[in-house]
Amino acid sequence: MDPIVIVVIVVVLLGAVAFIALRRGADRTLPPEKRERELPAGREAAKKVEVREKPAVEAKPARERPAERAAEPTPPPRTAPVEAPERPAGPSKEEVRELQKGLKSTRGGFIARLAKIFGKQKEIDPALLEEIEEVLITADIGVRTTEKILSRLRERLERNELGDADRVWEAIREEALAILGGSRGGVTIDRSPTVLLVVGVNGVGKTTTIGKLASRLQSEGKKAILGAGDTFRAAAVLQLEVWGRRVGCSVVKGKERADPASVIFDAVKKATDGGADVVIADTAGRLHTKTPLMEELKKAHRTVEKALGRPADEVLLVLDATNGQNAIQQAAMFKEALPITGIVLTKLDGTAKGGVILGIVDEQGIPVRYIGIGERVEDLREFDAASFVAALFAKPDDESMAA
């Protein structure tokens, strides 16, 4: 071969080798996207290399994927709210038992006498109703309320609805529940401050009721302020201060013989400025037959409206169950002077006259808010008509009757 041809071939081969080497070096400096576009033949190989070299980069998005997770239905939390079971239609056995203990004296009085009437007479006739009438009247239920109950029983007897003693007993319970059923127990604290004006004669347990009520509200997370509006009885102010320290709430008081209305005004203003939830205002409790007392209470009520911009949210009348018929008279006189919104009936645990609650509600049309069945704070109970009637009219068993 001609030496010149050999030289040309060698030069061409060397140039080709050099060109390929330069081309590969340039490709390495290109970004992966461009290199894939310009090197279609090596695209699949490049993908395999990236997967092998960067497994974590691919795995992380697949693990987090926030957008995809948001689109998926969220499983219910472990503590998802479940519909609360409906409250039983009747009172619980525990409620009835506790009330029976508190109403022991009353149950040992006219309830025991009713049970004896039904125990000795099986035949249902008008004579039985006469005996029932006597028991109800002597139990301080009141003549008017007794006649109302007996009239309904006679109507049902004429319709042959009272076939036996048990049915008559049940009918009495139904009539009692019809009288008391409109009562709503407790007070509603839905304004700031809610003002409760508490009235009643001396000796009914008014100041003690205020202290127990303050304790109940404080335990429910309400900030309470007490107004010592009974400025004519130094012991009432001191007693209220003791309760204030005991339950941890402020007591607003004035000087001895100060104007009660001014003390109540200051208590309402303090509650308004301090963001308190409720004001419980005590008032003087001289005999309800004294006209100056009623005028003083009217002034206190007007003062609340002046300080609050609206009337008192509740005017609670405290009555002593041991007073029997006198408690009904007190309710009538206080109702003439003030817009009484609720009754607190105290000392039910110490009297056989607990039936007076029927007469008060029936004759005055005032609902019962609380009842007192003992000395403990928790013995001031929100009134529940169904529980009360179930406890009061539960038939005594043979053992208790024998005793």
Image: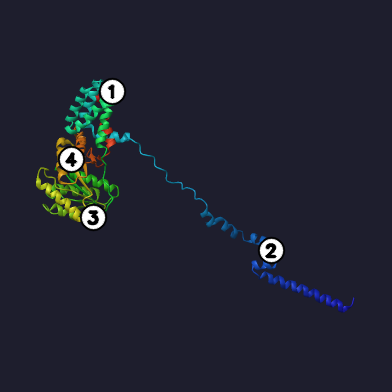
Q: In the image, is residue 86 above or below residue 18?
A: above
In front: label 1 or label 3: 1
Q: Nearer the viewer, residue 145 or 27?
A: 145
Q: Which kind of residue does numbered mark 4 sit on?
A: Leu
**Secondary structure beneath label 2:** helix
Which of disc 2 and disc 4 is earlier in sequence?
A: 2
Per the model, the C-alpha gap separating discs 4 and 2 is: 97 Å
Quickly name the residue at label 2: 43
x, y percent for residue 149 = 22, 31
Q: Which residue is mark 3?
A: 271
Q: Mark 4 near mark 2, Cβ–Cβ under 8 Å? A: no
- Residue position marked by numbered label 4 in the rendering: 319
Pick whichever of labels 1 and 3 is earlier in the sequence.
Answer: 1
Q: Nearer the observer, disc 4 or disc 2?
A: 4
Please state the total of marks drawn on the protein image. 4
Q: Secondary structure at mark 1?
A: loop
Tell me the CA gap for discs 3 and 4.
27 Å
Disc 4 element: strand
Name the residue beneath numbered marker 1: 164
- What is the CA distance from the residue labelled 1 to the residue labelled 4? 37 Å
Graded by Cα atoms within 10 Å as few (under 14), some (14 to 19) or many (20 or more), the crowding at tag 2 reads: some
Q: Is 220 above or below relative to 56?
A: above
Which residue is located at x 18 percent, y 40 percent?
319
Q: Earlier in the sequence, mark 3 or mark 4?
A: 3
* Left or right side of 2 for 307: left
Q: Amino acid at mark 2?
A: Arg
Residues 223 and 141: in front is 141
Res. 403 visible in picture: no
